[in-house]
Every structure is written in structure tokens, then in C-alpha cells.
Image (tube, helix red, strand yellow):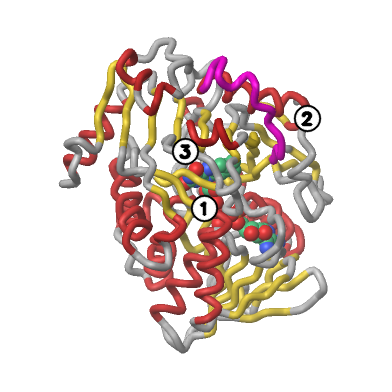
Amino acid sequence: MASNSYIIVGAGVFGTSTALHLITKFPHSSVTLIDRDAPDAQTRVAASWDWNKVVRADYRDPLYCKLALEARDVWREDPLWSPFYHETGVYWISRTGFAKEVIDNYERLGRKTEGALYALPVEEARKRYGGIFEDADYTGVENVLVNTTSGWADAKGALRAVTERAVQLGVKFVKAEIDGLEFGTEGECVGARTKDGERYTATHTILSTGSFTPKLLEGVANSTGRDTFLAGGRIISAGVTTGLAQLDDETAKEYAQMPVCIQENPPERGADNGSLPLTEDKKLKWWGQCIFKNTQAMPSGRHISAPPAGADYSQWKIPEFLVEDVDLSNKAIFGKRGEVWKTTSHRVCWEALTPSKDFIISPHSASRGLYVATCGSFHGWKFFPAIGSYVVRMLEGTLEPDLIKRWAWDRELPDVSGNKVWPLKELREL
Ligand SMILES: Cc1cc2nc3c(=O)[nH]c(=O)nc-3n(C[C@H](O)[C@H](O)[C@H](O)COP(=O)(O)OP(=O)(O)OC[C@H]3O[C@@H](n4cnc5c(N)ncnc54)[C@H](O)[C@@H]3O)c2cc1C
């Protein structure tokens, strides 16, 4: 592997973690990380770029529970990661038997739950954390799950610091927009080409391009005349809205110890919404429950969902409906306490989603030398410290068989009717 060379397109958590793990394992290999945005840009289009993200191992699925605990241990203990991690706990307003399933998973994995993870009856839960969630919507809720061993991380801070570390270790960062892939005489992928026509070649080309992946592959299918490159039903680009409210100093003191709050919504209300603890400058953040797609006609005539065209994905241009969607999260979590807060700085964050919500970490079956490592499916950020090691194992051919199957490019696509984050609405309808 040391004589191999790697191009990683996309410096979100999947690409950056892969770059770090590759250069750590193979310090003499050539690793180039390419992104349309500089690591220190004021704002970026990456889903991974954000004020803060939830870091939790509260999963129904034992696989992601285990993986998230592995990542959480790094967040806690490793000096590269720990300055960005805040173990505030997570308060889950759940309308299903979630609490029990999570506790069972932790116990099966031999992790401590006593005093760390517990289910509280609603009346007792309302009084916790100084009563800040007393006015939340508890309709149909039996128990609230409190996991004191989960929390959140400063997303943009961690992303920038880890990119800097990867560069210090020898990764070459290139700010450029990739427009197409390069192929050898036998159809193998030998690199990528920028919009300005510059070519970068390598033995391995890894696409970690998040929500842009289906559009990039559509362009490749178009230019090569090979439909086998298309993402098809494997990936859909979807957006969700976030918003922040500035708290005054007095109110901020009251909320200083708040945990992350996640509200498991009834299906008719949409996906789960939530709120994150205060940023350094005392801003409270919410994400909404409306998840939408943006189907567009490509020059080829194909129709696919992709972020709006333009360098910033129009991520700051928010229809009124989506502003209200964030306000609905505020209301469902803080009730009348939140009525005085004005949400601002709304952003649409674009993500790559798969029907099963499993990642894709796999060779692309259309061309030797081409790999895909992305599709966080609205839950991928927390795995930042660990996910690259799985990508490296995939590249080496040492990934465990169950993970090969789960994360394969070619896998059975389940029915999406049970997937609460699957987008049904179109952005233009909102
Ligand atoms: C609003 C929101 C909240 C979320 N909250 C959480 C959370 O609390 N916890 C959690 O675990 N997960 C969360 N997620 C999910 C998580 O953010 C994503 O799963 C993860 O960040 C995806 O990482 P990525 O590297 O695949 O993609 P991205 O972070 O989107 O990175 C893709 C990168 O590719 C670059 N790129 C794309 N196309 C090109 C091109 N042609 N040329 C050059 N560069 C290109 C982009 O600039 C970008 O930097 C959330 C997602 C959203 C949208």
C-alpha cells in the first residue's frame, strides 16, 4: 500500500478522516485531498461544516452503537479530538421503546449504563436540567432517555484542526472543484480533473463528495457514455434546515448546563428534530423536521436531486416555510420559554442519504481504482475520528464481511417507506 497514491475528493468528515488515517498508516505515500472550499473558509458547503454536531452512541442498530462508542472514546481521550468535544449528555424525548433498546445495546457491548443511561418518566424528566424542557411536547411519550455519556462537538473547529494535522503529516490539500474523472486505457480510474482542466492522477480515487456525489457521477456517466457510473436509487441528495438564536447573558446562564435535546417526532410531523447546547458566543441551535430533495434536469435530460447549482449551494437562501420549520422545533422543545427567541442565521445543509441510512464505503463497481466513501445519511458526523480507518480497511481489502455487505456500492435497496428521513417534498414546493 505504501507505493500507492490516493486522491480524495471532498474534505468533509469522510474524506478528511480517510486522509488522516491513510497518512498515519502510510507516511510515505502520496495523499491528495481536494475540496472546492478551503479548510479555513468563512463558510463551506460541507454538511460536516457546522457550528456543532451531536456526538452520541444512542443507536437502535447495534453496529452503529458499537462504532459510535469507538468514536466517542477517541473524542473523549485523544488530545487531537478532545478539545472539541463536550460531554453534556443527551435528553431523548422518545415516543417509542428507544430507551430500552439503547440500554440493552450498551449492556450487550459491556458498556456501563448504571447511573449513566436511564429512562425517566415524563413528570420526573420535566424537572431535570433546571426545568428547561418542562414545556416540551411530551404527547405520547412514556419515558425520556437520558444518556449522560453522549454530547456534542464543535464541528467547524474539529474539521479545521484535523485537516491541519493531516497536512502537517504530509497530506497535500488542493482547493479546486472536480469536474470529472480520468480513465486509463482499460477503463480504470486514474484520477480526477478540475473545472480549470488540471489533472490529478493516483492509483486510488476516492469520492467523499457528500450530497454532490450523484451529480458528479451523472457527469461522469454522461462524458463516458457509461450508465454504470450513475448513483441511481443508491443515493439521494436531501436538505434540512438549521437556525440559531442569540441568547442574552442572563438567559445563557440558565441554559449553560443544558444537554442536547432530540425529539423523536410522530411520523406525521416529520423527521426527529433537536436542539444543541450553546456555542461559545451563546447561540442556541435547532434543526427542523422537514427533509426535502431538489430534483433537477441535468444537461443529459436525466432528473436527479442535487444541491442548488452555485458555489454555495444557495445554502443561506431560505424559504419562509423552512424558517417556520425551525420555529416548530423550538416550540416542540422549549414551548413558551422559546417564544421570545428569534431564530436567525438559517442554513440549508445538504446531505447524501441512502435508503437504508447505511454509509457507502466501497469500490465503485463501474471502474477499477474508483472508490466511494460518503453518505452519512444525516448521522455520519460523530464517526469522524474513526470512519477513515474503515475506509483504509476497505481499500486494503481487510474490512469485515458484514461491513463490506452493509456499506457496498451494489447492495439490495430496501423500501424507503420506513425511513423517516427520506425526502418526499421538493424544495421548489416549499
Ligand atoms: C443539518 C444537519 C445536521 C446534522 N447533524 C448531525 C449530528 O448532529 N451528528 C451526526 O453524527 N451527524 C449529523 N449530520 C450528518 C453529518 O453532517 C454528515 O453525515 C456528514 O457530515 C457527511 O460527511 P461527508 O464527508 O460525507 O460530506 P460533506 O461534509 O458534505 O463533505 C463533502 C465535501 O465534498 C466537497 N465537494 C463536493 N463536490 C465536490 C467537487 N466536485 N469538487 C471538490 N469538492 C467537492 C464539498 O465541498 C464538501 O466539503 C447532520 C447533517 C445535517 C445536514
Which residue in the protein does label 3 denote? 256
61, 234: nearer the viewer:
61
* Quarter of the image with the N terminus in it: bottom left
Residue 420 x/y as whole percent: 50, 28
Q: In the rendered structure, which disc, 3 or 2, sits on the residue that comes first in sequence?
A: 3
22, 335: nearer the viewer:
335
Label drawn at residue 154: 1
Regarding mark 2 in the picture, which secondary structure is present there?
loop
237 left or right, relative to 390: right
Q: Nearer the viewer, mark 3 or mark 2?
A: 3
Which residue in the protein does label 2 denote? 319
**Does the segment drawn in magenta span residue 425?**
no
Tell me where residue 387 sits by quadrant. Answer: bottom left
Regarding mark 3 in the picture, which secondary structure is present there?
loop
310 left or right, relative to 249: right
Say which amino acid is labelled 1: Asp
Query: What residue do we see at 64% from left, 34% from top?
Result: 245
Q: Is mark 3 within 8 Å of ligand 1?
A: no
Residue 236 x/y as whole percent: 61, 42
Say which amino acid is labelled 2: Pro
Query: What residue do we see at 69% from left, 67% from top?
Result: 38
Residue 126 x/y as whole percent: 37, 18
Whether residue 234 is visible, yes or no, is no
**Residue 259, above or below 308:** above
Q: CA distance from mark 3 to mark 1?
A: 16 Å
Q: Which residues are magenta?
A: 334-347
Query: What residue do we see at 31% from left, 36% from top?
Result: 147
How many numbered marks are there?
3
Q: In the rendered structure, which disc, 1 or 2, sits on the residue that comes first in sequence?
A: 1
Say which amino acid is labelled 3: Ala
Q: Is mark 1 within 8 Å of ligand 1?
A: no
Instruction: Classify 10 Å Cα crowding around label 3: few (below 14), some (14-19), many (20 and above).
Output: some
